Amino acid sequence: MDLGPHAAFIWSSYAIVGVTIAALITWLYADGRRQAAALKDLEARGVKRRTSVPSHADDNHAAGSL
Amino acid sequence: MKAFLSLLTRDLRLAARDGGALGTAFGFFLIVVALMPLGLGPDLNLLSRIAAGILWIALLLAALLSLGRIFETDHDDGTLEVLATGPLPLELVTTAKALAHWISTGIPLALLAPLLGILLNLELKAYPVLIATMLAGTPAVSFLGAIGAALTLKARRGGLLLALVVLPLYVPTLIFGIAAVSAAAGPDGLTASFLILSAISLAAVALGPWAAAAALRIQMQ
Amino acid sequence: MQTITQKLANPTRFMQLSGIVLPWIAGAAAAILCYGLFLVFAVAPIDYQQGETVKIMYIHVPSAWLAMMAYGLVALSSFGLLVFRHPLADVSAKAAVPIGAAFTFLALFTGSLWGKPMWGTYWVWDARLTSVLILFFLYLGLMALRSSLDDESTAAKLTAVLALVGVAILPIIKFSVDWWNTLHQPSTGLTSTIDPSMRIPLLIMALGFTLLFFAMHMKAMRNEVLRRRVKALRLSDIARRDGRTSQPTPAAG
């Protein structure tokens, strides 16, 4: 498949898009696993979610209700 | 209305007493304009072609310098909270602040900028037009800048962040400012771009304080 | 009847729903993109002027479209946060900004790579490229503002205000850049009327990219919800530990 005289530009633009999207996806999965691991570790240490144990120090601003 | 005027005159008096702000802004303006020929070369007809652009960009940067201050001093000593709970709605407080900044920094810079046109070999007939466009454009600089100042009030690296946040908002003012200057040099004098420039400024004056007040309310929650 | 956004307001329900939907969207995105790439490289005709370099259009245009759509999504989420206090609005905005910035960068990069064979230079101050460049600065401003504020909830609301100011001024920026562009050089039509044989692959690629964006955005939102849960748990853990040590008698609450 001959891509003509400017083949380099075509390949490099497809490469940059591919690399960036791949980097985004791997970062997202790595971040997901890291958060899940942290969550599992916390629950292993007996820190229950607010819903299961009424903890007194719960302020009701948005982050707290998550 | 009286409260608005008293706040405005208070800010103007403060700005006048602390002459340093205008001094530094104008010093910065001078050094930026002086650096340009050193960078771009002393060729006079090149400089005269881009003089208006250099003066406008230097004006935007110089005004940006003094913008961080309009809320900071009041925020630090708590008068901002007092003003917020005072008779004047927060939107009018931000309007007064931005107006004070325009009068104390915007107008002087706009009037003094053309003097530096000499350094850049600006043609003589471009002077009145340059002053007119700068006077018409600087309200947008102050009022859009007030939004940035309110947003970056408690942020770390406030000054840099303010520039990054506010400069994209200045793009229309810069484009139509320069367009008005170059168009005015043409046959039909002040043209559509000058009107659009003024329209942008008026829109900024009308809508800017709303966003700035919203940001201040969030800051003070 | 709860609207879809109210139904999604509850983070746990969002996590359940997105857990089911995410693989399907990701799968569909991958399938459509593969089909699109097949069309682009095997079927689509070459452009009579540019020859093969028109193939760059098939990723440049979708990236630019996503860059703008992502900013629209950020503005919508910001509006949802400030006006409706939707608990997931900030999660959506915070998740969408980096992905949107990435696609804006891709649009600029592929645009300049396309410019070299077509206009002979890597960067041309064409109206479209310039507007996308300024859009990139708006993204940078959002990320910089959010990262330089410590308290999360004020950072969220302030970034929302900036996003709304940005989306309000974007059309004026677009208008002024177009005006500025016609002032200096005739605007070179990037995509003149496209021949249907080229338009179909372009639409398929655009659809694939859009699905990919929503899959990534949803995954980023899920990560953000988990991050906030971890943070909340750590705070409550510390609070309980302080409660136990500082007051030997059992804490009141």
Image (spheres, rainbow, N blue to C red):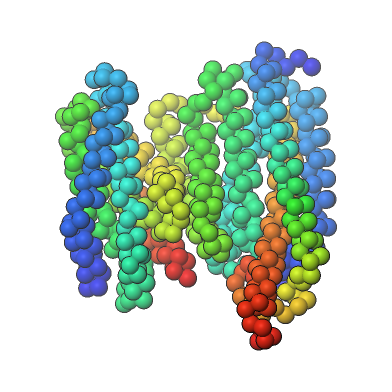
Is C195 in front, or is C113?
Answer: C113
Q: Is residue C54 above or below residue B13?
A: above
Q: How many marks?
A: 0
Q: Is residue B125 above or below residue C28?
A: above
At a point 34% along the width and 74% down the height, the residue shown is B82
Quadrant hosting residue B171: top left
Is A15 in front, or is C29?
Answer: A15
The N terminus of chain B lies in which quarter of the figure? Answer: bottom left
Q: Position of residue B173 (x, y in %)?
A: 35, 43
Residue C8 visible from this viewpoint = no
At a point 32% along the width and 76% down the height, the residue shown is B86
The residue lying furthest to the top in this view is A5
Q: Position of residue C2 (x, y in %)?
A: 72, 72
Q: Is residue C48 above or below residue C200?
A: above
At a point 18% along the width and 29% down the height, the residue shown is B118
Q: Position of residue C111 (x, y in %)?
A: 59, 29
Quadrant hosting residue B89: bottom left
Q: Position of residue C4 (x, y in %)?
A: 72, 66
User: Left or right: where does residue B177 sit relative to residue A61?
Assistant: left
At a point 50% along the width and 60% down the height, the residue shown is C158
Is C151 in front, or is C99?
Answer: C151
Residue B158 visible from this viewpoint = yes
